[in-house]
């Protein structure tokens, strides 16, 4: 199993709207691609000078499936997020293997 983790620091002035959009639109859109088995969104518990950080995790059965998702769906979904929250967030992705 692979965890596809996206860590996002979102500015506080759009945080609540972003969180609602993620739960109601973006995460369901990612899950509807059929490549992931489950997902979680977690708040990172750290004191920060700016923004709030979240970890969005998607569980995938294999690296091959994840690569297929990244090829076929990720660019469109990332663009949608970027267009909506341009200059309001920073993010990075991490792949984790469940042992």
Image (spheres, rainbow, N blue to C red):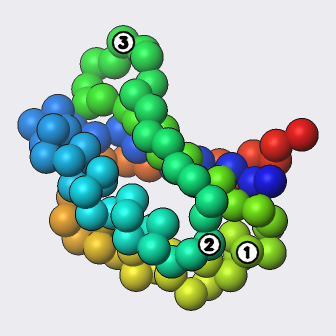
Mark nearer the N terminus (1 vs 2): 2
Answer above or below: position of 59 versus 65.
above
Instruction: Give the percent coordinates (x, y) of residue 61.
Output: 77, 62
The percent position of residue 26, horizontal first and vertical second, equals: 33, 63
Q: Which mark is residue 65?
A: 1
Q: Which of the two marks, 3 or 2, is nearer to us in this view? A: 2
Give the CA separation, mark 3 to mark 2. Answer: 34 Å
Mark 1 or mark 3, earlier in chain:
3
Structural crowding at the residue carrying mark 3, measured as other residues with C-alpha within 10 Å and reported as few (<14), some (14–19) or many (≥20): few
Q: On residue 35, which mark appears?
A: 2
> Residue furthest toward the left?
13
User: Is the C terminus in the top left, top right, bottom left or bottom right quadrant?
Assistant: top right
Toward the bottom, the furthest residue is 72
**What SS does tag 2 mark?**
loop
The residue under the point 80% across, 54% down is 1
**Which residue sits furthest right?**
99
Point out residue 34 in the picture as x, y percentages from the top left corner.
57, 75
Label 1 or label 3, whichever lies nearer to me, is 1
């Amino acid at each position: 199993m692979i965890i596809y983790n996206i860590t996002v620091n979102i500015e506080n002035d759009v945080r609540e709207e972003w969180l609602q959009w993620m739960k109601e639109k973006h995460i369901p859109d990612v899950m509807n691609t059929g490549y992931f088995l489950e997902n979680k969104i977690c708040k990172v518990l750290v004191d920060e000078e700016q923004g709030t950080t979240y970890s969005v995790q998607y569980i995938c059965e294999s690296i091959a499936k994840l690569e297929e998702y990244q090829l076929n769906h990720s660019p469109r979904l990332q663009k949608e997020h970027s267009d909506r929250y341009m200059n309001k967030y920073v993010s990075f992705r991490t792949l984790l293997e469940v042992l």
